[in-house]
Amino acid sequence: MTKILTRYGDGSAVELTETELMEDLIAGTEDAADRGNIPVMTQDDMDHLADIFKCTHRVVGVDPGYECVLSYDGAPIKMLRTNVTSDRILAMQIYEKLLGADTLEMGFVDYSFKPIKPILTFEEPLMEQALLMTTAPIMYGAQPNLGRYSQPDGPFPNPAELMPMGKIKEAQESYELAVDAAVKDMVDVASSMYESGVDCILLDTVGAAGDADALAGLMTAEILRKKYPDIGIEMGMAGEFVLGMHGSLEYDGVRLAGLYNHQMLELAQKAGVNIFGTVMNTSTTESTPWNLARAVTYAKACTDIAKIPIHANIGMGVGGVTVHDHTPIDVTSRASKALVELCNLDGL
Amino acid sequence: MQISQGMRLVEAKAYVAGKLGVAVKDLTDPIIMTEVRTDLKLGTLHAGARSAKGIEAKHNIANLLDIEINCVRNFRKNTSR
C-alpha cells in the first residue's frame, strides 16, 4: 500500500497509510468544529486535501487562478534575527526587489507599540524615506503587548501576581488601566506613521495577553478609522481564540473571552479593520494532515462570512505548519495550497 | 486594493485587471506584466535607469487605479506651493 510521507507538528517525519491519512483529516476537522462550533469540512474538501498530501512532489503550488498576495510579520526584524546585517530600508528593498514581496513592512526591533512612542522622531523620517524608494504598499507593524504595562516593566500592578493572591478585582482593574494606556500609545504611534505616509497599520499578535489585549486592538482600530477614514488597518490575531485573562471585557456588547477567530472577525469588521489575519495553532503531537484539516476548518469559518480580506497566518507553529524555526517546504507549501484553495483566502 | 479599499481578492483582481486592460490571468504572468508595467510606468521588479520607480511609480498607480495613496498625497503636498 502507498505510504504518505508527512510530518508531526514538531517537524519529525511520519509515514501514513491512506486510511490513517483520512482518519487524521476527519479527526482534525472534527476537533476544530467541536471547539469553534463551526461546520466540519465537506467530503469534497477532504478529498482535495487528501490529494494534496498524496502528491509525491516535494513542493506544491496553487492551481492557476488561486494566486494570492502575501503580507509579512516583522519582515526587517527577521533579517536581523538571521544575522543579515541590514538597516530597515535596505531590508525592505531586498524584500521588494529580490524576494518579490507583494507588501512591505517596517517594524521596530522590539515590535511593541509602547517603546516606539519615545522614538517616533526617528521612525517617521525613516518611514518617509522608505516610502520614496519603494513601490509596494508599506505596513507599520507592532503588537499591543499589554505585558509592557504591568510592573516591573510598566506602571500598573501585575495581574499575574494579583490573581494567585485572590485579588481578582484588583487584577481586572489593572487590565482595564492597561487597555486605556495601550490604546493611547497605539493611536499616537499609528497617527504619526499615517501622517508620515504609511499605507497600513498592522496591529499584530492581537490578544496575546488575553481579552484586554484584544480589546485594546479593537478600540485602537475604531479610533483610527474615525480619525483617518482611508487608513489601512490589518489586525493579526495571536491565537485561535481569545484567552479570558480578565474574563468580563466586552466590545460592542460582545464578551471577548473565549471568542474564536470567526467571531473576532465580525468585531474587527465593525471596528473598521481592512484585513484580518486569522490564526490556527499547531499541535506538536498530531500529524500535519490533522493540523491542516483543523486549520482549514477554522479558516473557512472566517472566509465564509468575511466582508474584508482574510490573510491566514502561516509559519512556525500556526496555520498547520510545524513548530520549528526552519519550516519544511513540503509542509509550508501544502499548508499554503490547502488554505488558499479550500478557503478562498485573500492572502497569507 | 485590499489595503485602501478593503476589497476581497477576486474583486480586487477584477478591478485591477480592468484598469490595466488585461485579463485577470495575466496579472500573475511576469512576461506580460513587465511589458504592461513598463508601458504604463508602474514600476517593475528590475527597474532600469530612467524607468519609473519608487514614489514615481506610485504616483502613476494612484492615477491609474483611481485611488488615494497616502504617501503620494504627501509627496504632492510637499512638491507644490
Image (cartoon, coloured by chain):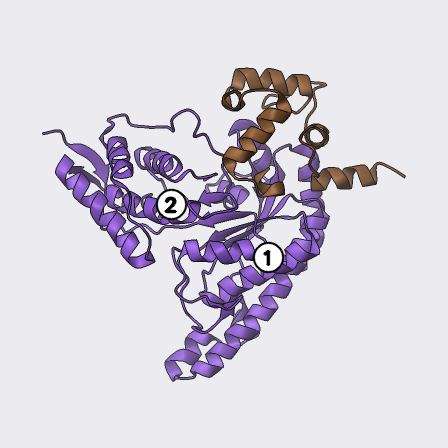
Chain colours: A purple, B brown
Q: Is residue B50 visible?
A: yes
Instruction: From the top left corner, tell me how far across and down residue A149 is, in percent.
Output: 54, 69
Q: In the drawing, does residue A12 fall left or right of residue A277?
A: left
> Amino acid type of disc 1?
Ala
Q: Quadrant of the N terminus of chain A?
A: top left
Say which residue label 1 marks. Answer: A221
Instruction: From the top left corner, tell me how far across and down residue A297 is, in percent.
Output: 33, 47
The local secondary structure at tag 1 comes to helix
Task: In the rendered structure, find residue A300 and report the number of the disc placed on it.
Answer: 2
Which of the marked residues, 2 or 1, is nearer the chain's N terminus?
A: 1
Please tell me how many numbered marks the rendered image carries: 2
What is the quadrant of residue A60 in the picture? top left
Instruction: From the top left corner, tell me how far across and down residue B1 is, in percent.
Output: 60, 37
Toward the viewer: A21 or A11? A21
Instruction: From the top left corner, tell me how far across and down residue A136 is, in percent.
Output: 61, 34
Is residue A254 placed above or below A105 in the rendered structure? below
The local secondary structure at tag 2 comes to helix
Q: In the drawing, does residue A241 fall left or right of residue A176?
A: left
Q: In the drawing, does residue A250 fall left or right of residue A241?
A: right
Q: Which residue is drawn at 25% across and 31% down?
A: A51
**Disc 1: CA contacts within 10 A as few (<14), some (14-19) or many (>=20):** many
What is the quadrant of residue A103 in the picture? top right
Q: Quadrant of the C terminus of chain A?
A: top left
The disc numbered 2 marks a residue on which chain?
A: A
Determine the residue located farthest toward the right in the rendered image.
B81
Determine the residue located farthest toward the left in the rendered image.
A1
Q: How far apart are marks 2 and 1 (CA)?
A: 24 Å
